[in-house]
Image (tube, helix red, strand yellow):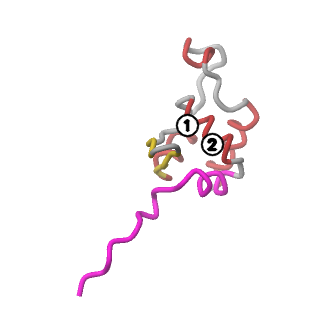
Amino acid sequence: MTEPLGRDPDVLTTKELASKLGLSAQTVRRMANAGQIPALRTGKDYRYSWSAVLDVLRQPHPIAGGTEHEQTNPGAGRLATQHARERAQEL
């Protein structure tokens, strides 16, 4: 007998990702809107690949004053982004 298909444990909701990173759901959404973390829009919310988010957060961060996109769409604040990167390094 085959097992019923379940949800991929690597795919997280905004609330689940926020909990893992120690951030608010609103901050995670801001990061997704700004392109700071990879996300797939599903209706009004997002879904996130845990491994893809970790890969991005573990990369060295860009130098301040980088691209025009970063300046016009700041996303999450500097401290929240720093916290997410530190948390990703711990995991």
Q: Residue at x 46, y 64 (%)?
A: 9
Contact between labelled residues 1 and 2, with CB atoms less than 8 Å apart: yes
Q: CA distance from mark 2 to mark 1?
A: 6 Å
Q: Camera-side residue: 51 or 76?
A: 76
- SS of the residue under disc 2: helix
Residue 74 image position (x, y, % from top left): 65, 23
Residue 68 image position (x, y, % from top left): 56, 11
Which residue type carries mark 1? Answer: Ala
Quadrant in which the N terminus appears: bottom left
Q: Is residue 18 left or right of residue 68?
A: right
Q: Residue at x 68, y 36 (%)?
A: 81
Decide: is 36 above or below 48.
above
Q: Read off the residue under disc 1.
A: 32
Quadrant in which the C terminus appears: bottom right
Q: Read off the residue under disc 2.
A: 28
Which residue appears farthest toward the front when viewing the image? 43
Q: Is residue 22 left or right of residue 35?
A: right
User: Is 82 one of the magenta-colored residues?
Assistant: no
Q: Quadrant of residue 41?
A: top left
- SS of the residue under disc 1: helix
Which residue appears farthest toward the left when viewing the image? 1
**Residues rendered magenta in the picture:** 1-21
Decide: is 71 above or below 28.
above
Q: Quadrant of residue 13?
A: bottom right
Q: Residue at x 44, y 42 (%)?
A: 40
Which residue type carries mark 2? Answer: Val
Decide: is 31 above or below 90.
above
